[in-house]
Image (cartoon, grey):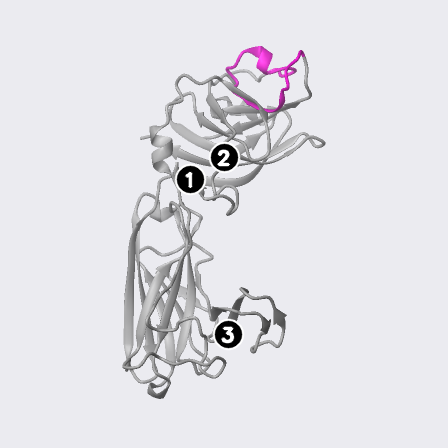
Amino acid sequence: MRIKYGSLLLLLGLVFVFAACDDEDYNVPEGVRNLTNDCIKRSLGPNVVGNEIAFAYAMALPPDLGNLSSVRVEASIAGASGTYLEHRSFYTHNGGIVPSTGEVREGGADIGIVVGAPSVTNGKVTEVTFVKDTCAATLRYYYVIPETAKGQSVTFQFSATASNGQSVSYNMGPYEVGKIEMKREIVLTNNSYFSISDFEVYDETQAAANPDKIDLVYLYRTPFAGINFGHALVSPGADSEFLPGVTLPQGVNNQTYIRKDSGSRDQHLARDRYGIFVDDVDLYEIDLSTQPFYSIGLQNESGAWIETADGKYRAYLYVNLVDNAAGTMTVSVKRLLIE
């Protein structure tokens, strides 16, 4: 499991955190007489379809040479819906009154100042046109990873132009996109059936119509016979003692391997909590062939590693929320097709 900790520091010869020359005091370092730029990747962890790759693109020129005109980002693979370039430039506020709004904010607040029109994306290209006299800005770019990028690498070219005709560009990448697929916040209800292969929840009638797809049965049971059963994921092929009160539909009998892991976490599935990520390598390398066909007593923030009966998929399942009163469990899953 890949562990990523730390903070991002942007140490540049230019002061990129200031948004507009007439909003903030700004001085380009002595000797710099041209448009200059830099870029950092802000997002951490493996790149997964449906998630974002985030960047901060900074550019500046001496005030007497003109203003910024436009910013452009071209991806090698067109991003999915939701890809955009911020039209606000952000800086970290020291506390007190915010000059652009007059509101009082605590120190450390992320303040955005509008410097351009909302971005326009056409295919691979996303652009912002400046609408305010601005000689220095840091704009954030969010690329939503599309299905077409799965298993591929993606690159980005950032570029800026100024009113004096100068232009600069900055290349980022390549960034490998994993083959992992992900679905978050799936609600399982008591005695429901779940398919790893299609991320779908089935009721009994639907399971009977799709027996080969059923990998797990979700149960909620109060303690009985000395067993603290609680919230459980059970393979249809497990012994009947682990399926109390359940009559499986005809043909629902897959033997799915399950390994409970209360110490695992994944930042993507936990919605930006923790500094740990499950990636392709974790699922390729894990051996679940000796694991049982059930996992009982699942709690909030626990997890389970899963392999389907045909060995086609391996998955990591994270428990977002258990609800004893409702008899439900909300889970998020990363899965990998084993090729």
**Residue at 35% from the left image edge and 48% from the top image edge:** 148
Determine the secondary structure under disc 3: strand
* Residue interval drawn in magenta: 225-247
Which label sits on residue 181? 1
Please report the residue visible at 34 percent of the width from the left and 35 percent of the height from the top: 281
Q: Nearer the viewer, residue 137 or 125?
A: 137
Q: Amino acid at mark 3?
A: Val
For the residue pair 279 and 51, the one nearer the viewer reads as 279
Identify the residue position indicated by label 3 in the image: 114
Q: CA distance from mark 3 to mark 2?
A: 40 Å
Q: Earlier in the sequence, mark 3 or mark 1?
A: 3
| Sooner in the amino-acid sequence: mark 3 or mark 2 | 3
- Which residue lies under the disc numbered 2? 199
Q: Position of residue 178 (x, y in %)?
A: 35, 42
Q: Nearer the viewer, residue 1 or 97?
A: 97
Residue mark closest to the camera, 3 vs 2: 3
- Local packing at callout 2 (Cα closer than 10 Å; few below 14, some 14-19, many 20+) is some
Label 2 secondary element: loop
Q: Is residue 117 above or below residue 174?
A: below
Callout 2 touching callout 1 (CB < 8 Å): yes
Residue 233 on the magenta segment = yes
Going by the numbered disc 1, the residue's amino acid type is Glu
Residue 301 as seen in the image, left or right of residue 155: right
